Structures are given as C-alpha cells and as structure tokens.
Image (cartoon, rainbow, N blue to C red):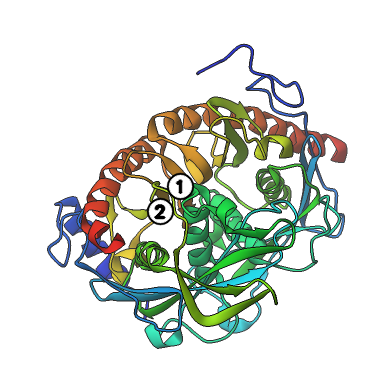
Amino acid sequence: MKTTNLTGERIKQYLDEGKRFDGRKPDEFRKISVETSVSKKAEGSARVKIGKTEVLVGIKMDVSEPYPDSPNEGKLMVTSELLPLSSPRFESGPPRFPAIELGRLIDRGIRESKFIEFDKLCIKKREKVWGVFIDIYSINDDGNLIDAAGIGALAALKQVKLPKYDEKNEKVLHGEWTNKKLPLSKDIPIITTLYKIGKNIIVDPTLEEEDVSEVKITIGGTVEGAIFSMQKGNSKKISIKDFHKVLDLADKIRKKFFTSIEKFLK
Amino acid sequence: MSAVKEFKRPDGRKPDEIRPMEAKVGIVPNADGSAMFSFGDTIAIAAVYGPKKMHPQHQQNPEKGTLRCTYNMLSFSVTERIRPGPNRRSTEIGKITEWSLDPVVMIKKYPNMVIDVHIHVLQANASTRCAGINAAALALAHAGIPMNDIVSSISIGKLDKQLVVDLDKDEEDWEEGEGATDIPITMTPNGDITHIQLDGKINSKVLKEVIELARIKTKEVYEVQKKALKDSIKEIK
C-alpha cells in the first residue's frame, strides 16, 4: 500500500521541526551492516542491511568478446531484480522501470568512477576480455535500495577473485578460483541519494519517506569531493538554491557515509 | 566562467556556442501535437496523442492524468546499427523525459486519462535526450495541453577542465586530461531544474558553474522553441 497523504503531511510537519518518525536526524543513516562472501558460487558477494532494507549482491565473471569501441577493455553489466518476495509492491515478470533505474544508477556510479580497471581485464585484444556481472536482488524493501545496492556492489567487488582460465582451450574454469583479485583503483565511488521532502533534504529514507519525497538526487563520488555520476529522479522540479544545498550536503554525507562503511570494504 | 581562449573544440565552435538549432511544430498531421527539434546533426521528433482514456483500465488514476513518454532511436540513427525495440537505456530516458516534463504539464486536469508522447531520434550526434525533451515540450504545447511553462534542455560538458555547451559525439568521447563529463540539464524559463544527469568527473564547485551556464543557455533554447510555436500560429492564419 502506498503511503497515505495524511502520513505524508505528518512526515513533512515533523521534518520542519527537524524530526523523523524513527528519531533520526535528517542527515542520519539507519544502522548499516554488511556481510561479505555470502555465496560460495559467486566470485564475490555481499548482503547489505540498512535498517530493515536488505539487498543481496553477487558478482560473476565470464570471458567474452569485447565491445567494438573498447577492444582491449573488460565489460561491466549491472542488473537488478526487485523480487516480489521483498515487497507486496513488486510483481514478477519483465523488469519494470524501478528495477532498470536501480541497475543503471549503480552501473554508471561504478563505471564512470573507473573504479574497476578495465584495461587490466583484457585477455586478447579484440577477442577475449573479462566481463564483470553485478547482479542485485532486493530481499526486503524498506526504502533506500539504491544506497544499499551501492555498498553491496562495492563490498562484493572488493571480494572478487578471478576464476581460473584455461588459455589452451580458451575456457573459463567456473568453480575454480585463482588468488588474483579484481584490479581496482583507489577512487571508491560512494553512491548516495538525497531526497527532498517539502523544504527539507534527507538521506536514507524509509519506504514511507521515499513515497512522499518530491525529488531524489543520486550522486556517485569520492570522499575527496569528485563527482562521477548524477541523476535526478521523480517528477517535481528543484530550484537552483535547493540544488546547491543538495550538492553541499552530498559532499558532507559522502564522507560520513564512507566512515561508516569503510570497514566493510577491506 | 573558466574561459580558456586557445581551447579548440573539434568542430571549431566557441565553448558556449550551441550548434545551429532548428525547431518546427506540426510535423505529424495525424498527431494531436507534434514537433521536431535539432541541435546540428542531432534530430529528434516527438508526437503527442491524447489526452485519451487510459487503457488498460486498471492503470487509470482517478486523481490525475498520466504522462507517458517513450524514447527510441531509429536503428540507422547511429554509425553501428542498434537493434530495434526498447532497451534499458531507452526505458530510462523515457522516464527521465516524463520527469522533466511533469512539473510543467497540468496533468491534474485529466483524471483517468493518458497523454502519450512518442519521441524518436532520427539522426544522432550526441545530446539526443535534450533534443528529445525539447521536441516533446513543443509537441505538448502544440497539442494544446495546458502547461504552466515550457521546459528547455541542453547538455553542458566539461572537456578536461573547459566547460562547453551542447556536446557532440566527438566531444562525448573526449579523452585528453580529465576526459569528458556530460551533464544534460532541463530547466524552466525561471531556472528551476526539472532534470539533471551527469557522467564523468567533476566537483560541486564546478557543478554550480555548470548550472549557471545551463540557466543562460536554456534561455537560448527557449527562444527557439517560442519562435517555432509562434510561427505555427502564423501559418494557420
């Protein structure tokens, strides 16, 4: 059930006084926990919980032909499925927009940061490169799946061990791993989403808060202040003044958010 | 603005120079409203059908109408053929277009109805979503859909450290220095942002400059749109 207008009004009233239903401050995240290597079959995996929201991220690697415009670079593919299991709002069938949006937001956050060093994932120019497949599944949706999926992808990427590759027969030996890690750069892309509700800007919304927010802005960037990707969501407009507020807050939030998840990215 | 004088754009434009824009409304006689908008070689057309009864019925919203946008690139609009039909990118851009138009369309007037906006890119040389949004806004106005404003879209780019306006494909693939950052932005004439996306590398300080530049440049787009609408009325007379 979608959040009622009445609840929405109350959420706004509370926020105007700087309060939220669960007692958090506007710029405060719920408790974040990350469990890595949750799958024995995946090359890397993570289970992320933010409050009651939970996602599962798994990474598989495979060898295939490179894209013609990047003949010596590995490939990245991020997909997400919003499982009917995780919310009464999700239905089975082909992916609808929210699932596509989630996948693409994480895809661009990671791709544009050049976090994965794709040039090191080439086996044979124009013929064989490694592909990184990041798959995101929602387990429980209580708001802010995007940020949860972002941490999940980072934590899982850090875990990845390359599978063995039989060069003679040009075949991946699935299920056997080398000790080689995925080549990653220092620029860790932190994906955070800021939500505008009435006059207020908050982070990590619950499902109710997400429902009543007018504008959301997802930003991928580093703690040092570089921004790699951004997308505004939802169908309301935002003034330049508020947009500046979002940018300033996002710079702060990324630092804070990173401190709380740093330990999971070892 | 960090204006480096000797900066050369691949096609010789000035950093803040938009490619020649063309706009025309009423290009699809069957549609309730239609328009073409182009930035140089990038050409988008849009057609509006509706407001009409939403079908299937269970998708009807008794509180307000629905704006439904689809974005599509013709298979031969780019160098290498794209497989016809929707893909993840086009689905996203369709939704982004809806979001960029929603704040100005008075959709509340049409409960249980849908307004369909079909956008097709006939020829692509980057900034296709911006051209698409501009065409869609025109088509909606041409269809006589009540709107409290129009929106205008432009892509701002950062090539290495230089800000430029209206990226073309060569610039999108810019690799020198910090590479290319592509920032499509849509604004109302008042300077409210209805859409922003970003890919590349930038910081908040420069991004604020980008917004300011977009504010100035969307006004130029707006003038072109306004003229196209006025011209269409002249033709009727």
Task: Report the amino acid beneath label 2.
Answer: Val
Front residue of this view, candidates B41 and A128: A128
Q: Quadrant of residue A136?
A: bottom left
Residue positioned most to the front = A168
Name the residue rendered at 59%, 34% in the picture. Answer: B157
Name the residue rendered at 86%, 41% in the picture. Answer: B236
Q: Which residue is mark 1?
A: A237
Quadrant that contains the N terminus of chain A? bottom left
Name the residue rendered at 59%, 51% in the picture. Answer: A119
Does residue B105 show up?
Answer: no
Rendered location of residue A181, percent (x, y): 44, 63
What is the chain identity of the residue bearing mark 2? A
Task: Report the amino acid beneath label 1.
Answer: Lys
Using a 10 Å C-alpha cutoff, classify the residue at mark 1 as few (fewer than 14 neighbours), some (14 to 19) or many (20 or more). many
Quadrant that contains the C terminus of chain A? bottom left
Q: Give the SS element for disc 2.
A: strand
What is the chain identity of the residue bearing mark 1? A
Q: Give the SS element for disc 1.
A: loop
Residue A119 relative to residue A24: left or right: right
Tell me the number on the disc at residue A215.
2
Residue A100 relative to residue B38: left or right: left
First along the sequence among labels 1 and 2: 2
Rendered location of residue B30, percent (x, y): 86, 60
- Vertical relation: B213 (above or below) B202: above
Tell me whether the residue at label 1 lies in contact with that at label 2, contact meaning CB atoms closer than 8 angstroms.
yes
